[in-house]
Structure formats: C-alpha cells, structure tokens
Amino acid sequence: MNRTLMNIIRFVALVTAQVLLINHIRLGGYVHPYIYLIFVMLLPLNTPGWQLLLSGFGIGLVIDLFMGTLGMHAGATTLMAFCRPAIIRIVSGSQKLEMNREPNINQVGFPWFLRYTFVMVLVHNFTYFMLEGFSFHLVGQALLRILISVPVSVFLIIVVMYLFSRDKGKMRDKR
Amino acid sequence: MYNLFRFIQKHHFVILFLVLEVLCVWLLTLTQGYHRQKRINTTNDIVGGVYETGTHIGDYFRLGKINHELAEENALLRRQLAATIDTTTGFQEIVNADTVYNFIPARVINTTVNRPNNYILIDKGSADGIEKDMGVVSSNGIVGIVADVSPHYASVMSLLHSYSTISVRFKNDEEQIATLRWQNTNYRYGIVDGIPTHLRPKPGDTIVTSSYSYIFPENLMAGTVVELIKSPDGTLNQAKIKYATDFASLKNVYVIQHTSLDELELLIQNQQMP
C-alpha cells in the first residue's frame, strides 16, 4: 500500500483508539497509557528529520486538542521525535537495519523493539509528566505517574504491534 | 546571507525542533492561570462530535446499567414527591425549589479523572440555555461548574480540579460552613477545609452544599466524611471526604439554571457601587 496513505490511516486510527478507548483506562487515577506514540515510532527509518518532527508535533497537537492539554502532548512528542534517530542508533548497537523499512516488530525482532519502545515511551512520559507537574507544582506525583505509566504503555504498544502485524507476517510468507 | 541559508540548511533538524518546542511552550502558557483556564478550554463542536459518536457506540454496552441508574433516580424522586405532598414541608421550600432553579438534563460524553485539572464534556450547549458558571449535579451528588460553552457542547470544571472550591456544610449542623476542595491525588476523595475545633465530624457524616452560593441550591449531597485530620497547631481542622459522585463512571447529569440569576447579579453589582 502507498506509504503516505498507510500513515494517514494509522494516524486517524491511533488518535481514535487513544481518545475513545485508551483514555478510559484509569486504574486508581495514576495510569496514563499512550499508544498513539506508535505513529512516530513506526515511521520508516529513512524518514527525513523535518518530517519526523512535524509528524510528532502534529499527532501531539491533535491529541492535545482532544484532551484539553494544549502544548503538553505536542511538546513531549516533538522531543521524542527529535530523540528518535539517536535512540535508534543506541538501541541498535551493531545490529544492521534495512533503512527504507519501518522498524516493525517483525522486521527488527522482539528484543530490539522492546528496548526501542521502552526508551521512546520513557522520553515521552518524562517530558509530558514534567510539563504537567511543573505547571501544577506536583513534581513528586509526576514521578510516580511516570513510574506506573511507562510499563503499561510499553505493554500496550507491544500488544498492539502483535495484534496488527500478524496479518502482514502471513502475507509475506505467502509471497 | 548565503552563510545564513547554509547554516539553516545544515542544522534544519535542530532549528525546526527548537521552533516547534517554543511553539508548544507558547501554547502551554496560553492555557495557564485561573482565568485563562476558564476561558480557553477546548470546547468546540468537532471535538465534541467525535466524543459524542464514541459515547453513542459505548452506550449500547452499558444500557442495562444506565437504565438501572435512571430507575433508581426515578424512585428517589417519587419518594421525595410523595413526601412533599402529604407531609407538612414548609411552603417556603416548595416555592424555592420550583421557581428559582431549573434543571437541564445532559449526557456526559467525555470525562477525565486522572489529571491535575479535570474537565467533563457534556452534550448540551448555549443552544440549550447553558451558560458559564452554572452548577452541574448528578443523581448522586454535585459534579462541577460549567467552565466553557460552545453551541452544542459544554465543558464542566469538575470537582476534581485544583481551582475547584465549593461552599459546604455538615448536614447535621446548619450554621457552620466550610470549603470543599480536591486533594489532587485520588478521584474518590476530597478535603474539607476550615472546620472549627468544636465540630467533631464522625466518619460517615454527610456533607451538603451550603446556602451561601447561587450556583448550587442548598442541601445537595457532596460526600461523606472518611476521617478527621486534626490541625497540628490546634486551629481549623480538615476532613477527608469521599465524593458522593463517582466521577469515573458519570453518565447522566443535570445543569442547574438559576432562573433569576440576572436579577441577583444586578443586585450584587449595585451593592458594590458606592
């Protein structure tokens, strides 16, 4: 499928899922899982930097509009997009990746993807909860939220990746 | 000039990043502070429409529970009606209840409980007569105050908000008023400030709205006392309370319209003039 079209569909699907489903998860009020980060995480490895940044800013801003947190998600996601090339370098080590591909869990393997997801989510959540914490003077609570939310987000992202990549795997086998 | 372009071209990644982050911080400062928070909230019909569609889909899976809640409320209202008609409830109370406050039913289409400042989106707006600063209640207890309205939706500043303070009193003590605010951590519990030491609220005591407000009628359920927190310097005590409203599963609410609010505000305005 056309890569741009694929990304537009993914954008809409992730925003809808985040806003209408995932935001209703509230175990005791501290858990904030964010799966919309998948959009930025799955952009092809050779995506130009400016597209990466604008994608991060764009999806963050749309989420902000829905959640009434103007600037917070956009700021966190932009920083995450900015860090992505460095994170990929660090996480890869000596592992060689196909540069024109998406860093899909099937392509890169589970250990790589887990490390990648963990660092990306950590960068995002740290920025987001610090922005939220500083603006409301609740830094201690922000740290607690990070501690609880990061594992939940990572888990959900991995689950979503497995749910939606199984079909593609089968298609590749047939070919 | 050429060098400048070369510089931008070479470092466009970092420059764009900085520009976007500055933009984000600017957006963030737009929505900080009490008055801005009340004014610039993202109530608009597009966002409202998406949430409403989502709620409609979700509602099919909850019809049983919603029906049950409405039936319970009906039963409560019938009991109250019966009480009003056949006992000797004072004439004054009936007049107050019927003429001053009007209740507009609304549906909750989105709600948050896990942020430092929480808002509730409802499916009625200025077209239905909803205005800023109107009180919102559920069948269980008070919910919040309307912060912003668009033609068909309104966003309600929930009790779970760092700026939310409500004038309350203990049900068994008509005189002494206190202030209810959120303790900012758990969506089930709030704090009542300013309890004089001669009052000894016990766990389970009921907290209701006081009469010193024209947003909420008197005697609406706010919550029940969980524990008394003694002040270390022996002045005013606090009490931890459990909210009567379950904000996480809020569905049907009523917006309270004060029918003679204009008159009241005019009076207050005139009073302040020299």
Image (spheres, rainbow, N blue to C red):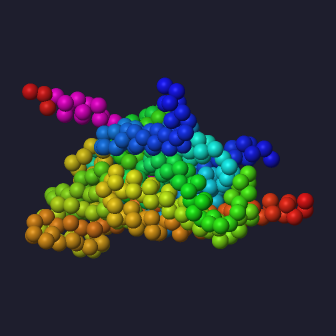
Q: Nearer the viewer, residue A24 or B28?
A: B28
The image quadrant that residue B238 belongs to is bottom left
x%, y% of residue B143? 39, 53
In this rendering, is residue B230 above or below B4? below
What residue do we see at 21% from left, 48% from top?
B212
Image quarter hosting the C terminus of chain B? top left
Q: From the viewer's perspective, tell me whether residue B176 is left or right of residue B183.
A: left
As drawn, the residue found furthest toward the front would be B3
Q: Quadrant of residue B39?
A: top left
- Report x, y in % for residue B229: 21, 71
Which residue does the image show at 45% across and 55% down from the upper left? A128
Farthest-out residue, top: B1
- Report if residue B266 lies within the magenta region: yes
Residue A61 lies left or right of residue A142; in this view the side is right
**Is residue B163 visible in this depiction of the protein?**
yes
**Residue A113: x and y, percent?**
65, 65
Q: Position of residue B272 (x, y in %)?
A: 14, 32
Q: Which residues are magenta?
A: B251-271
Residue B134 visible? The answer is no
Residue A6 versus residue B262: which sits nearer the camera? A6
Tell me what residue is drawn at x 50 percent, y 44 percent: B14
- Of B154 and A49, nearer the camera is A49
